[in-house]
Structures are given as structure tokens and as C-alpha cells.
Image (cartoon, grey):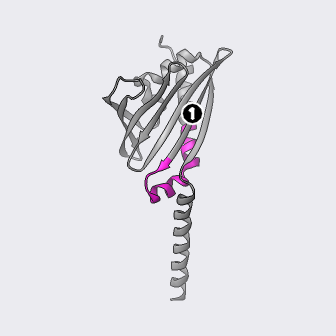
Amino acid sequence: MKYLKYLFILIIVLLLIFIGKGLLTSSISYENEITVNASAKESWAIMSDESNLPKWIKGFKKTEHVSGTPNTVGAVSKVYIEEQGEEMTMEETITAVKENELMAMTFTMDFMNMDYEMSFKEKDGKTVISSKSTTTGNGIMAKSMVSFMKGSMSEQEDKNLTNLKNLIEGNTKNY
């Protein structure tokens, strides 16, 4: 009986730590960057070509246009991603576009919301592609879970950007 009491106290303490971290960390932010051996114009064209999205974004399945003019500020789309065998749907709203330089969007899901920005800066014939992400959980349990996911989310973005780099540098299509 004594061990059950200690186990119960341990579970309560761990639960309080989990919930407390979610209360103290309302959002997580991370930045990632790669340099590609291509112009910003070519890099932008390859990144924004919808047929390339499954080639560099893990789990990407498709998008469905909902409203607005595609690839312009205010455009809304449904984005379908497969994660661990389950399909997730999120709503993407474009918040800023500056061709060959910047694309920003907000992703809204039941579990969390994400503000995402990708920028392209050309220098000496190469392009630095940077991404900035800020993610907020919706609800205390989601906030707590998101507060522990920063490392894995940043790592996945690194993999996506590496895939994009390989796609750009291996490109044979004339954009």
C-alpha cells in the first residue's frame, strides 16, 4: 500500500510538471536555414511548384484551394499531411508574399496553430533559405505537449529544408 501511495504522488507531480510547462510556455519558436547553390528566382520557383511539395515536405499529400487567389495574401487552402499513418488536415492562410523573397502563412489545426515564414536571400549566386516557425497549442494539454516538441519540430524542418536543397540543386526542369 505504501508503494501505491508513492506511485500516486509521483504521477501527480509529473502531471503537474507537464501541465505547468504548458502554462509557462505558451508557444515555441525555432529558426532553420540552408544555403543552396542556385538563384533565389530558381529556388523560389521550385519551392512553390505544387508538384514538388511531396518531394520535400514529409508526409505532404495534397492541397485543396478554399478561397482567395492562389499564392496571394489571403488565399486559404486545406492541406493534407499523413503523419504516422494518419491523415491530418490543416487550414493554410497566406499572410505575406514577396515573390522570390518571402512567403508567410498561418496553419490552423484542432491541436495547434503555427505561424510560418520562409525567406530567400541571394548572395554570390547562392541563396540562403530561412524558415521561422512559432507554434501554439490549442488548449492546456496541447500547449503542454507542444512545449516538449520544439526539438523534434525543428529537426523535421531541418530535414524538409535539406530535401528542398537537394531538390533545387538536382533540378533539371527549366523554370
Extreme-right residue of the structure: 124
Q: Is residue 170 among what the camera can see?
A: no
Q: Specify start and end residues of the magenta stretch as a single range.
A: 136-158
Secondary structure under badge 1? strand
Furthest toward the bottom, the residue is 1
The amino acid type found where label 1 is placed reads: Ser
Total number of numbered discs in the rendering? 1
Residue 20 position, x and y percent, is 55, 64
Residue in view at x 37 percent, y 28 percent? 75
List x then y, in percent, for residue 19.
51, 64
26 versus 57 height, above or below: below
Residue 10 among magenta residues: no
Q: Please provide percent x and percent y for residue 66.
A: 30, 31
At a point 53% along the width and 27% down the height, the residue shown is 164
Q: Position of residue 38 (x, y in %)?
A: 59, 17
User: In the shown orientation, is residue 65 left or right of residue 105?
Assistant: left
Q: What kind of secondary structure does the magenta stretch mostly adopt?
A: helix
Q: Which of 138/57 is in front?
A: 138
> For this view, does 162 lie left or right of residue 53?
right
Q: Is residue 149 above or below residue 175?
A: below
Circle 1 residue: 131
Q: Is residue 68 at all visible to an observer of this figure?
A: yes
Q: Residues within 10 Å of mark 1 (few under 14, many from 20)?
A: many
Residue at image point 42% right, 26% down? 73
In this rendering, the answer to whether 60 lies above or below 37 is below
Nearest the camera: 125 or 58? 125
The image quadrant that residue 52 belongs to is top left
The residue lying toward the viewer, choosing from 94 and 170, is 94
The residue at 57%/27% (across/down) is 119
The image quadrant that residue 128 belongs to is top right
